[in-house]
Image (tube, helix red, strand yellow):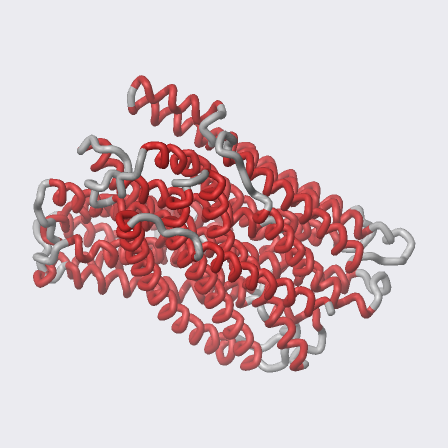
Amino acid sequence: MILGLILGISVLALAFAGYLISWVLKQNTGTPEMRKISDAIKQGAEAFLRRQNTTIVYLAIALAAIIFILYGFVRQHNANDPVKSTVQLAFWITLSFILGAACSVGSGYIGMWVSIRTNIRTASAAMTSLNGALQTALRGGAVSGLFVVALSLLGVAGLFGIISQLGIVDDPAKIPLLIAGYAFGASFVALFAQLGGGIYTKAADVGADLVGKVEAGIPEDDPRNPAVIADLVGDNVGDCAGRGADLFESTAAENIGAMILAGGLFAANPGVFKATQLLGVLMFPLVARAFGLIASIIGIMIVRTDEDKDPMAALNRGYYVTSVLASIGFFGSAYWLLRTERPGTEHAWLYFFFCGLIGVATSVAFVYITQYYTEYKYRPVKSIAEASQTGPATNIIAGIAVGFECTALPALVISTAIISSYYLGKNSGLQGAGLFGTAVATMGMLGTAAYILAMDTFGPITDNAGGIVEMSKQPEEIRVKTDRLDAVGNTTKALTKGYAVGSAALAAFLLWLGERRRREVLRWGGIILFGLATVQAALWQAVIANPLFNDEPVGRLVMLDALTIAFGLPALLYAGIAWLRLGPIELQWVARIAASGLAFLWLTLEIRHVFRGEVLTWGECGEAEWYAYSAAWLAFAGAGLAAGLKWRKDWLRRASLAGVGLVVAKVFVSDMAALGGVLRALSFLGLGGALVGIGYAYRRLRPLQQE
């Protein structure tokens, strides 16, 4: 019954998403000029996602094969394994990995497919009413949110049900250990979707604004700017598909991690729960999340506004209703599945309900904090706008100051949520319930994930709608309406980034506590991804260095160029440092910034040449792009050299010097001839060797340093 309820609500949510798709597609598509712009956005977004997903599929198949080999034939069996055979363990972990990756890719694609068809319908609805445009954009965005959360639930519950029915595992509490690969598959896709889409959208956005608004002096989204379409495409692939994969990863990891801790809670309290309650305790995280889906559906459908009212107030009202209904769902789930009759523990379910309320309150706090720091009517944004009156220098100073300031409150909120939920669980009367309390708080925060993701996708839809209205030269009063929605959309996009950071922090904490087994998968996956990314990047750099490509117009290869940047340098750095455990968060952002800067540089060069009526070729931009990231490579290789000198390791010094030497040699090569390509390919390998050396020395010598 419990499993059937979860699967039934998940299927119901998918069916409702299908209804929303049908409703959106029935809306008016506007004028022929509007459809022409919309078709260009669709073509670009679908091309990007098709190429990105192709790369993900190839790498996922290779990684799945190696995971199977390592778990089935390399790793030794131990007594704590959920099954008796290593081959059986390898099969289910690999299968769950593939399903997790497939569900993440599928939910992201469907969400973006609807998003790029909702934008023109939102623009058309704005010609008649603000409320019509608001509802069209939100309901189109809700498809992404519902698919992400429902497929996450359906995948985990479905795998659990299949394994349970086949009788593969004697103890149902060990089933979550067998399907941990589902979360890793979701993480694998999120790595590419977030980095690929994020880098593309930032490069296109900055390039379009810099060349169009600053250099050419034309308005934003002006049809004379050739980069506007790339900018509008980037909104979809970054803020829709990329953020969807990010939250899919968080929900999948939280679902499985909470189930593992629930099994531990049941085992730590023999005699407190009835034997028949085991399934209910294990399924509690999924049941609570399923009720959150129903709450999100109701919240989405009640959103409406008047012509003279603030659209953000309508979205907030829907979110508050969703939060209240999700809290009621938590209350019912805790009373139904966690209630005990032993004296001293009979009120434990109430403690866990309050843990869930802490999670809901955390999500509401993140919404308030993000709105305060990003909405135009509050002090932070006003202070930045006021500072801009005296020039770009004071604008940058004020912006950085606000950026630093806005990180304090989220950190305090997350810390408070973790500590308070832990102590509530600890005082519930059950043994080992503190960690489970943090799991319940995480579920509370992610209980409204479907509605939050709907607001996130609302952002790129309204941004695209404004661009379509501007480029198709619609009346000014229509642009005023879309600008109001676009301003709200910018806030909701920022809101979801903050929400994703907070939920990921709680989910990572939960996963670290409850899923120690996953470290092996991450370690070997990092090794494999590191090698694949190195080879891919080296081959690509050698290919574009070939003289045959020097006369190829950059405009024909912008999409392939952006994807290669997104998958080459960031994947190389991120995968390597994830395996080496060498400050992954900080170095990931270094990789993002370096690759974003490179993509932005190439796009800007191309836009400038289009304005001048010229055709930019690879040969012309090769040296510029090389200088853009040679400094980043030198920094990493230099770090390896410093580590080798400090720890007196000759092999580390030699590897780092090789990386430095190859980079410097390429800088002095004045063209894109074959020699330059060979040196560039070798410098990738030299950088990889330097990173391996740094990580190895860090891991091996840090204990000595601490002593």
Camera-nearest residue between 88 and 216: 216
**Residue at image location 56% in from the left, 63% down from the top:** 15
- In this view of the protein, can residue 270 be seen by the observer? yes
Does 70 appear above or below 461?
A: below
Camera-nearest residue between 283 and 20: 20
Does 179 appear above or below 217?
A: below
Residue 432: horizontal and vertical position, in percent?
Answer: 75, 55
Quadrant of the rendered image containing residue 50: bottom left
Determine whether, in the image, residue 46 is placed left or right of residue 166.
left
Residue 631: horizontal and vertical position, in percent?
Answer: 24, 44
Name the residue at the right extreme. 343
Residue 489: horizontal and vertical position, in percent?
Answer: 44, 40
Does 618 appear above or below 483?
A: below
Determine whether, in the image, residue 311 is placed left or right of residue 556.
right
- In this view of the protein, can residue 694 be seen by the observer? no
Where is the N terminus found, in terms of image quarters? bottom right
**Residue at image location 76% in from the left, 53% down from the top:** 332
Quadrant of the rendered image containing residue 92: bottom right
**Residue at image location 22% in from the left, 41% down from the top:** 223
